[in-house]
Image (spheres, rainbow, N blue to C red):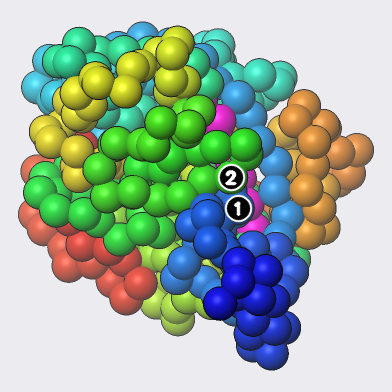
């Protein structure tokens, strides 16, 4: 069968199944678009905005998992808020909102395991943080509550994690394909380390003992009843350019061990008004905002959590254990 005939058959099946909108189906190249999530094939409205961030610092700290214990974690790369240390509190981070992300008020705090190239921590040439709606009704999305904390991915994973949580991508010409290990073809331009955070909150807790149970992933654009509050879906995209950052022969691994232990941490230390405007003008409006665009709209209302505890003297990692709720991916953070 000719290549053209195969392509026509694929496109006919796509039309018959109704897989349209923001979804792009890979043909014989095996590549899919940046916004493709294999677990969400239902057509959903897509609003988005993106911020590009540089490396702030690198340290073996984790103020979510190992609060108050400097050097107690594996090595992390910190981006966004410059003030993050092992003992950072929400009040301290918002009092000094210096950031490595572009855009005034883009002061969220993120960190992920350092990527090792032949055993040496290596800085990525580009780090993008995407905020997306991906809800059946994007008007239901609200900003994160202040001081919300969460972890996506499993720092102890020894096998491939679900593709909607943590994976490696090979990028060529703006298209990407997921790979089980960080090895790309000779004509690929970038190796991408990608983490997706859950976008459904239980509406009560700012954190949980496992740093995950208070959050859940949406299913076909809908949040589960246990986590009914839709919040922005974050995708952390860490890009390494071949010929500049890495070589084909390099051995790639993560500081948390192996190649499957991908994960990332987030604390909502955004400027509240800035995040509210972006949620209202981009996500609620199902609009793909350009990089640096600041919508001139009334900020969306920020929900209030009943648990307003700010971590100051202890690590939440020592507060018992909790089973992940429906829609949550089990596993360890850090």
> Between residues 89 and 39, which one lies in front from this camera angle?
39
Depicted 330 relative to depicted 271: above or below = below
> Between residues 72 and 309, which one lies in front from this camera angle?
72
User: Looking at the image, how many numbered discs can be counted on the residues?
Assistant: 2
Q: Which residue is mark 1?
A: 33
* Quarter of the image that includes the N terminus: bottom right
- Residue 327 shows in this picture: yes
Q: Is residue 131 magenta?
A: yes
Q: What is the C-alpha distance between the residues marked 1 and 2?
A: 5 Å
Q: Which residue is mark 2?
A: 175
- The structure residue drawn at horizontal position 72% and vertical position 35%, both measured from the top left corner, is 273
- Residue 265 shows in this picture: no
Q: Point out the stretch of residues depicted in magenta.
A: 127-133
Q: Is residue 177 magenta?
A: no
Q: Secondary structure at mark 2?
A: strand
Q: Secondary structure at mark 1?
A: loop
């Amino acid at each position: 069968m000719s290549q053209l005939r195969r392509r026509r058959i694929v496109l006919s099946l796509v039309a018959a199944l109704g897989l349209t909108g923001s979804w792009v189906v890979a043909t014989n190249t095996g590549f899919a678009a940046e916004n493709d999530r294999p677990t969400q094939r239902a057509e959903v409205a897509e609003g988005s905005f993106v911020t590009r961030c540089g490396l702030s610092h690198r340290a073996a700290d984790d103020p979510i998992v190992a609060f108050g214990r400097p050097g107690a974690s594996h090595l992390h790369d910190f981006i966004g808020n410059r003030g993050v240390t092992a003992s950072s509190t929400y009040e301290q981070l918002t009092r000094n909102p210096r950031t490595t992300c572009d855009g005034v008020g883009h002061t969220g705090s993120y960190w992920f395991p350092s990527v090792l190239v032949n055993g040496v921590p290596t800085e990525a040439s580009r780090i993008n943080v995407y905020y997306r709606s991906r809800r059946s009704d994007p008007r239901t999305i609200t900003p994160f509550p202040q001081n919300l904390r969460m972890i996506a991915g499993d720092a102890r994973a020894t096998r491939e994690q679900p593709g909607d949580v943590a994976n490696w991508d090979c990028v060529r010409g703006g298209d990407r394909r997921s790979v089980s290990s960080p090895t790309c073809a000779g004509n690929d331009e970038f190796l991408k380390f990608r983490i997706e955070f859950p976008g459904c909150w239980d509406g009560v807790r700012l954190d949980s003992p496992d740093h995950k149970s208070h959050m859940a992933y949406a299913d076909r654009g809908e949040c589960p009843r246990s986590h009914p509050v839709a919040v922005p879906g974050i995708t952390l995209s860490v890009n390494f350019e071949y010929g500049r950052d890495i070589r084909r022969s390099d051995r790639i691994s993560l500081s948390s061990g192996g190649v499957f232990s991908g994960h990332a941490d987030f604390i909502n230390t955004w400027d509240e008004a800035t995040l509210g405007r972006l949620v209202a003008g981009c996500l609620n409006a199902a609009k793909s905002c350009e990089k640096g665009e600041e919508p001139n709209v009334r900020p969306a209302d920020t929900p209030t959590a009943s648990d307003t505890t700010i971590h100051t003297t202890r690590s939440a990692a020592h507060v018992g254990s909790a089973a992940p709720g429906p829609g949550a991916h089990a596993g360890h953070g850090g």
